[in-house]
Image (cartoon, rainbow, N blue to C red):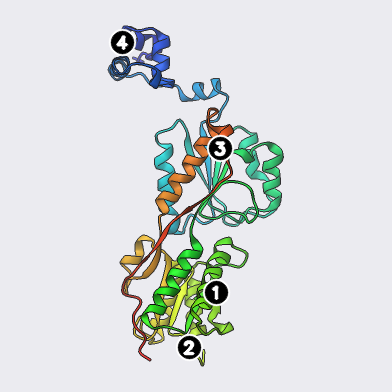
Amino acid sequence: MAQKTVRIQDVARAAGVSTATVSRALSNPDILSETTRKVVQEAIRATGYRVNQAARNLRKQRAGAVLVLVPNLGNPFFSQILAGISARFSNSDYSVLIKDTDGLADHDAGLVDYFLDGRVDGMISLDGGLSQTQLNTFETSGASGKIVFACEWVHDCPLPSVRSDNAKGARLAIQHLHELGHSKIAHITGPQGNVLTATRREGVLLERDRLGLPARPEWIIRGDFSMQSGHDAAARIRAMKDRPTAVFCASDMVAFGLIAGLTEAGIRVPHDISVVGFDDIEMSQFYIPALTTIRQDRRRLGCRAADLLLERLDPLTAERADSAIELVDVKLINRASTATPLE
């Protein structure tokens, strides 16, 4: 026998209130007294009433979902950012959709279709590699007011963003190595054209100049945030006549690959070369040796990005929302991969 569908009228009857009061308890509970809210909530539990979210979204002319762009879902760095986003939206009426943008063609304008087709109401992009064509398409479609960047961003783009203080993190890494006694410090960068690569490299160069440290062109090594690029960099460092005594890597994954490559060649970390990473992903504290790194508050990055988007999706706060750049502080986590140089 089919189970009877519980209607809002059944809840109202069980609570002894009007259907309008039940509707207010569901959509705007703050305008009701605490006593009334509790009575309605108890009636909802007792009757087993469930809101028809699809119908509700249709009445409000919205999709009830937001899209999160992730440049590489296989990278564990993004896990805590996504957890922060999910936590914030779990208390809202929005579902979270995730799209991996790895391999997305620069000319692809399909992202705007998520808005035009009514599949999403807003977007958080963790990918700073969106093309100008894509950004222009968002602008002309009217979707740009509902987009927030987190972690990465597009240079000279007016859209709001939440980002770590990347330059400060790089400077903290160089300061730490200098305080240990290192002067010959190499840097393995992220991929060319990436805003994080540029900002962290700028921090390295500024702090190196401030401290008067020696500079050699070969001590700046291009990477791409992957373990493979760190492993490849180890071979280049091994071949150097004037070998650095310390290396600051643009990501923890690069640092893991570098340490593996150095260890395979019999170069000990930190006895022969000290290594610092950037991110403080979960594996960092369990790696051997445990990685000294720059900690990003990744969960906060996700939470704040979600907060900014929610402000833009709420008609009551959308007009007051600005295109702010919010910096999240970073800190150095000192572990076993750095030590005083032998020479």
Relative to 7, does residue 285 appear above or below in the rendering?
Answer: below
First-in-chain label (2 vs 4): 4
Q: CA distance from mark 1 to mark 3?
A: 35 Å
Residue for badge 3: 321
Q: Earlier in the sequence, mark 1 or mark 3?
A: 1
Residue at 67% from the left image edge and 42% from the top image edge = 138
Q: Is residue 317 left or right of residue 176?
A: right
Location of mark 4 (residue): 15
Tell which tag, 3 or 4, sits nearer the viewer.
3
Pick whichever, 293 or 94, lies toward us: 293
Name above or below for residue 215 compared with residue 59.
below
Measure the C-alpha gap from mark 2 to mark 1.
18 Å
Q: Earlier in the sequence, mark 2 or mark 1?
A: 1
Q: Label 1: which residue?
A: 205
Which corner quadrant holds the N terminus? top left
Label 4: which secondary element:
helix
- In front: label 2 or label 3: 3
The alpha-carbon separation of the residues under discs 3 and 4 comes to 39 Å
